Amino acid sequence: MKKILVTGGKGQLATCIKDIAIGLNGYNFIYVDLDELDITKSKEVNSFFESENISFCVNCAAYTAVDRAETEQDLTARVNKVGAQNLANACNKQSAGLIQISTDFVFDGKKSRPYREDDPTDPLSVYGLTKLNGEQEIMRILPKSFIIRTSWLYSEHGQNFLKTMLRLGSERDNLSIVADQIGTPTYAGDLAKVILKIIMEERTENGVYHFSNEGVASWYDFAKAIFDIAEVDCQVSPINTDEYPTPAKRPAFSVMDKSKLKTELGINIPYWRDSLKKCLNKL
């Protein structure tokens, strides 16, 4: 029985993994959150890996409050960089596999074509920088690992843009949403399937990969689609980023090229609106 550790166990991605992994034979999934395992403490992590005999780890744990990270830089670095480093060290000692979940925020958003895995990184925010640092530590310690960068993650679980829009749409008649930040919404359930495929097929094509749903959208497009599909009567108006200033800068364009993942891992990726419909049906 292979023991698979999933950190950030109460988050939306881990919960989606749990939904899909129920009933899988030959695997024992262990879901932990901060109260069960503090990944920023190396001794605690090493002890946990040894006592549980972990054979694979999926690191969904992260400090993801992008704006708050600008003032909580030490905590953000401990979780996103040191936590990743500790897990990589423990995996190395146990000869365990590792999948690290990263972000499109490692890029500055100045390109006019989708970002490839080997494009230069230049994060604009503390969150993006610490996630990049986590990637770098993992590749230094455990080159035979998977790093999956994703974007605009949402699901029927936890707190995310979809849930926020549904709440605000029920409370207000109109909303103003940023229309000049371009990327791709990603359904966490689709990403969970990719993660489980890598584990169950024991894939060895290690390295950095990009995964989001297919297609391109602005946050305005995303909000419009949510209200259209959910039949919520709320007017949405487009605004520019400078009309909605935030402590952390976001990349203006963070569409990712997923050719590597589709070719090397043989994965078919759904269109973002199709996955949004599927998620809304579950809600």
Image: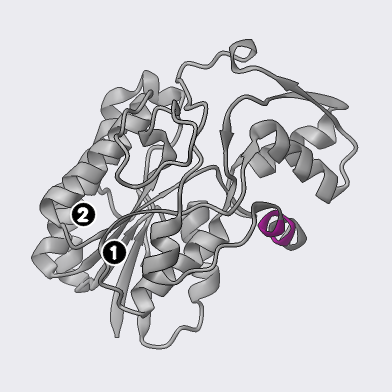
* Residue 283 shows in the view: yes
Tell me where the magenta segment starts and ends, as one range: 274-278
Residue furthest out toward the front = 113
| Residue depicted at 57% across the width and 44% down the height | 184
Inspect the image, locate mark 1, and give the three-letter code of the amino acid beneath it. Answer: Cys
| Residue depicted at 46% across the width and 20% down the height | 249
Can you tell which mark lies on residue 57? 1
Among the two numbered marks 1 and 2 on one chain, the one whose residue lies closer to the N terminus: 1
Inspect the image, locate mark 2, and give the three-letter code of the amino acid beneath it. Answer: Leu
Q: Is residue 158 magenta?
A: no
Horizontal relation, residue 30 to residue 190: left or right: left
Is the C terminus in the top left, top right, bottom left or bottom right quadrant? bottom right
Q: CA distance from mark 1 to mark 2?
A: 8 Å
Is 138 rendered above or below residue 115? below
Horizontal relation, residue 187 to residue 273: left or right: left
Can you tell which mark lies on residue 87? 2
